[in-house]
Image (tube, rainbow, N blue to C red):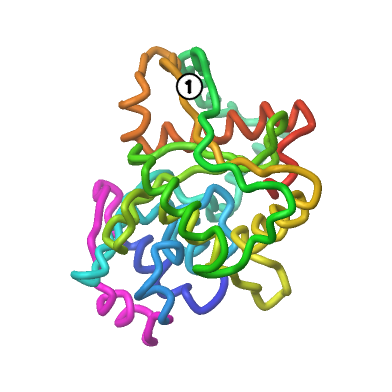
Amino acid sequence: MAGKYDPFGRYLLSIPSQTLDVTLSFLDIQEVLKFSLPASALQYQTWWTYEVHPKQSQKLCWQNTGWRVEEVNFSRRQVRFHRFSPPNFQDKAEPIVSPISETGSLPNLVSPLPVRSIPDLSLTVHNPAWTPVFAIPQSTILLKGRHGLYPQIIQAAAAVNNRYGCYSWGSQSEVYYCGSFAQDYILGGFKSNLHARVHNYLQNHRINETGQKNTNLMVFEKINEALVKEDIILSVFSFEGINFTNGTYNFSQYCEDPDLVHTVEQLLISWYRKQGQCQWNRT
């Protein structure tokens, strides 16, 4: 961890390991930090949203300590954190070295720790397909904010009532970007989580202190570049079933499981990159 959110990271590290969920008010967090949360934290789900490879300092703070934001309740001004993995760092301990005996012989070595075996890991998706949600016609200029095609695109996205899932931006023959909507935005007044995700692409644009554009702005600009020569299609991923290691899941179960959605998202990105696609994905 590094930066102004360090105190909150230390607070999360102090929570007993057997505690898997903790709900804090915005005021609780501010008291730990000793400063007020930014306005975006009090208004936008994306400030809190889990990312596989976060860049924002606040997300690095809690994800690097093994926590993720599971739910934000803006009306109650509360955030629920869930422990999802061990911290991705560890203290470096000094190695324990047994001294050589006075006779010059080596001491008996401590037996090595046993290797922990796990089941074979596999993921098979049966009859996968991309279902078109909205096609932005070639030569369209996508405008930031609630202008141009915004109402039509948003209406189409709002009609997708899957709670969680994967989506793509692409052409008729190629996937340019693959992502997921695996966070609840309904409390923000959105009709569906895909509605909220697409809304952010169209108007939640930022450039950080190093000059890097956020994903929303980067994809928004890539869409406009591609529209010069072809239609760009927003699609959602569907399938008949998944075999994941020793479990079987249908599509409805997948739509309720954010961890499984993130797993499928990474599989899709990796597979398409092997085909030379998903060129807009940064990671």
The single residue placed furthest to the bottom in the displayed view is: 35
Where residue 115 sits: x, y (%)? 52, 21
Residue 134 seen by the camera: yes
Q: Is residue 115 magenta?
A: no
Rendered location of residue 225, percent (x, y): 77, 55
Q: Measured from the top left, where is residue 235 in percent x and y?
A: 54, 37
Give the number of marks: 1
Q: Which residue is mark 1?
A: 116
Compared with residue 78, is residue 263 higher up or lower down, i.e. above or below? Answer: above
- Quadrant where the N terminus sits is bottom right
For image coordinates 40% across by 68% down, the residue present is 44
Could you tell me the amino acid type at mark 1? Answer: Arg
Q: Residue at x 73, y 74 (%)?
A: 211
Say which element carries label 1. loop
> What residue is shown at x 43% (from left), y 76% (from top)?
40
Measured as percent of width and height from the top left, residue 168 is found at 58, 39
- Quarter of the image where one finds residue 149: bottom right
The residue positioned 71% from the left and 60% from the top of the image is: 221
Is residue 117 positioned above or below 177 on the image?
Answer: above
In the drawing, does residue 48 fall left or right of residue 228?
Answer: left
Compared to 11, does 209 lie above or below?
below
- Residue 105 visible to an observer of this rendering: no
> Toward the viewer: 143 or 29?
143
Q: Residues within 10 Å of mark 1 (few under 14, many from 20)?
A: few
Q: Residue furthest left?
A: 76
- The boundaries of the magenta stretch are 15-38
Left or right of 73? Residue 254 is: right
Asked if residue 94 lies left or right of residue 190, the reply is right
Residue situated in front as seen by the camera: 30 or 123: 123
